[in-house]
């Protein structure tokens, strides 16, 4: 089948419709064809310039390059690197903070309706996305991101961030959403010859700073002199991380504990996210002394540790995690808790082999794709009195809620948190209970 004639660069005047899930797009139409338009807002009239698509494409991707009739929530983007053809990291720099949350409400509402068949009321949701860290005035950008991966221009050695849906680099001298701990290292101010990418981590609750450098193939690690004390690691071509100097881990502080997170392993990137999510999970589950609990996709043990404190020495918590290094960290972090066991394997592989036929509580924080029908069916068969589902993707959450309903569970509460301001991302915590028999 012919690919069709390219339409990249074509400009169309369109009226912008609803926000779409993922990527910061809104939906528009031109001569019957759907356009997913970035840098636009619902209700606007814009000139959309096609960035991807041909005459044979089912839909086109485009940027709003001229705003003919702006929405009331539109503001000038505070970041000079935000806009059509520029950095793809932030989706909503041109939107007031309240307007961003309204867009996220619209996305979650649509996904619940379309994929789970639930209204907000039926999901136990009050219809809001909660701000975290206090409300901000329009035009002010919160410096929240404690982990950033920079790419490096091979010609100049200057760092930058990827453009939307592209490997092309947008050089930056300051990322506005980077936390103070990231910015103070001065990574953006120097050149990095022989380096392909740089991961910068600024731990919350400790002074630990880590920089993980990936040299270009065949290059030696350059001499690194940063503005603050920092541990340096390098990643080789087999994705193995080697400590150069300093620790190979950072210490994070959350839920009244210090957590070791090694080699750039997963940790929530908003400094208030861990305590926010632990609080929502514990409030929803209301763990009781002596209960048993599962923490699935447990990472370095954040929820397992919080549950262990609540169920006490007469209770038991089993954590399952597929990352070998995260399991090592989790066992270290929770070594003083005799009522916690952490196992290394994929949840869908190990859980059926445990022999566990029932449990009181379950918390799961699956990857972006969700848990899936088979795993949800297994969990629904364990007769838990409550389940906490932590979700970073509203579509995956909604799909899995539908699977849970097939297994006899329904959400009784749902909270959404704006943990990624200026982007389309947000986090949810759903609490499920068995559906009462008629």
Image (cartoon, rainbow, N blue to C red):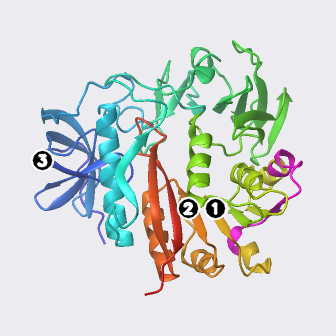
Residue 407 position, x and y percent, is 53, 82
Residue, disc 3: 15
Callout 2 touching callout 1 (CB < 8 Å): yes
| Residue 366 showing in the rendered view | no
Callout 1 touching callout 3 (CB < 8 Å): no
Compared to residue 301, the image places residue 405 above or below, namely below
Compared to residue 372, the image places residue 415 above or below, namely above
Q: Secondary structure at mark 2?
A: strand
Which quarter shows the N terminus? bottom left
Residue, disc 2: 389
Q: Residue furthest top?
A: 227
Q: Nearer the viewer, residue 261 or 263?
A: 261
Highlighted magenta segment, given as a residue range:
330-348
Q: Nearer the viewer, residue 379 or 31?
A: 379
Q: What residue is rendered at 58% in x and 14% in y?
A: 189
Residue, disc 1: 363
Instruction: Nearest to the eye among marks 1 and 3: give it.
Output: 1
Q: What residue is rendered at 45% in x and 37% in y?
A: 89
Residue 307 is inside the magenta segment:
no
Left or right, 91 with respect to 200, comes to: left
Q: Secondary structure at mark 1?
A: strand
């Amino acid at each position: 089948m012919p690919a069709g004639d390219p339409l990249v660069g074509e400009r169309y005047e369109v009226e912008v419709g609803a926000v779409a899930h993922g990527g910061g797009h809104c939906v528009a139409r031109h001569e019957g064809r759907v356009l997913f338009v970035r840098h636009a807002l619902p209700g606007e009239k814009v000139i959309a310039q096609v960035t991807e698509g041909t005459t044979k494409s089912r839909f086109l991707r485009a940027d709003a390059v001229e705003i003919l009739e702006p929405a009331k929530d539109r503001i000038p983007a505070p970041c000079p690197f935000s806009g059509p053809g520029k950095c793809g990291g932030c989706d909503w720099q041109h939107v007031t903070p309240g307007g961003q949350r309204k867009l996220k409400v619209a996305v979650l509402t649509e996904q619940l309706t379309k994929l789970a068949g639930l209204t907000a009321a039926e999901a136990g949701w009050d219809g809001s996305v909660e701000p975290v860290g206090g409300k901000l005035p329009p035009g002010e950008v919160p410096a929240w991101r404690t982990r950033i991966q920079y790419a490096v221009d091979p010609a100049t050695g200057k760092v930058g961030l990827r453009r939307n849906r592209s490997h092309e680099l947008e050089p930056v001298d300051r990322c506005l959403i980077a936390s103070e701990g990231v910015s103070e290292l001065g990574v953006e101010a120097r050149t990095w010859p022989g380096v392909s990418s740089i991961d910068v981590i600024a731990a919350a609750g400790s002074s630990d700073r880590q920089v993980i450098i990936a040299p270009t193939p065949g290059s030696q690690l350059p001499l690194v002199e940063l503005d603050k004390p920092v541990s340096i690691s390098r990643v080789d071509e087999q994705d193995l991380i080697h400590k150069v100097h300093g620790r190979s881990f950072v210490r994070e502080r959350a839920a009244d504990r210090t957590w070791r997170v090694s080699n750039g392993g997963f940790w929530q990137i908003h400094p208030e996210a861990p305590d926010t999510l632990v609080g929502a999970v514990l409030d929803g589950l209301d763990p009781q002394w002596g209960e048993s609990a599962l923490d699935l996709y447990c990472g370095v043990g954040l929820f397992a540790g919080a549950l262990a404190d609540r169920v006490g020495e007469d209770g038991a918590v089993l954590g399952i995690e597929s990352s070998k290094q995260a399991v090592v960290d989790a066992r270290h972090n929770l070594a003083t808790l005799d009522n916690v066991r952490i196992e290394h394997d994929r949840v869908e592989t190990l859980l059926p082999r445990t022999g566990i036929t029932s449990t009181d509580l379950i918390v799961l924080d699956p990857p972006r794709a969700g848990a899936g029908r088979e795993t949800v069916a297994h969990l629904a068969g364990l007769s838990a009195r409550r389940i906490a589902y932590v979700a970073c993707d509203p579509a995956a959450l909604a799909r899995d809620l539908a699977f849970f309903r097939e297994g006899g569970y329904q959400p009784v509460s749902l909270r959404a948190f704006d943990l990624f301001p200026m982007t389309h991302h947000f986090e949810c915590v759903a609490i499920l209970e068995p559906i009462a028999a008629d």
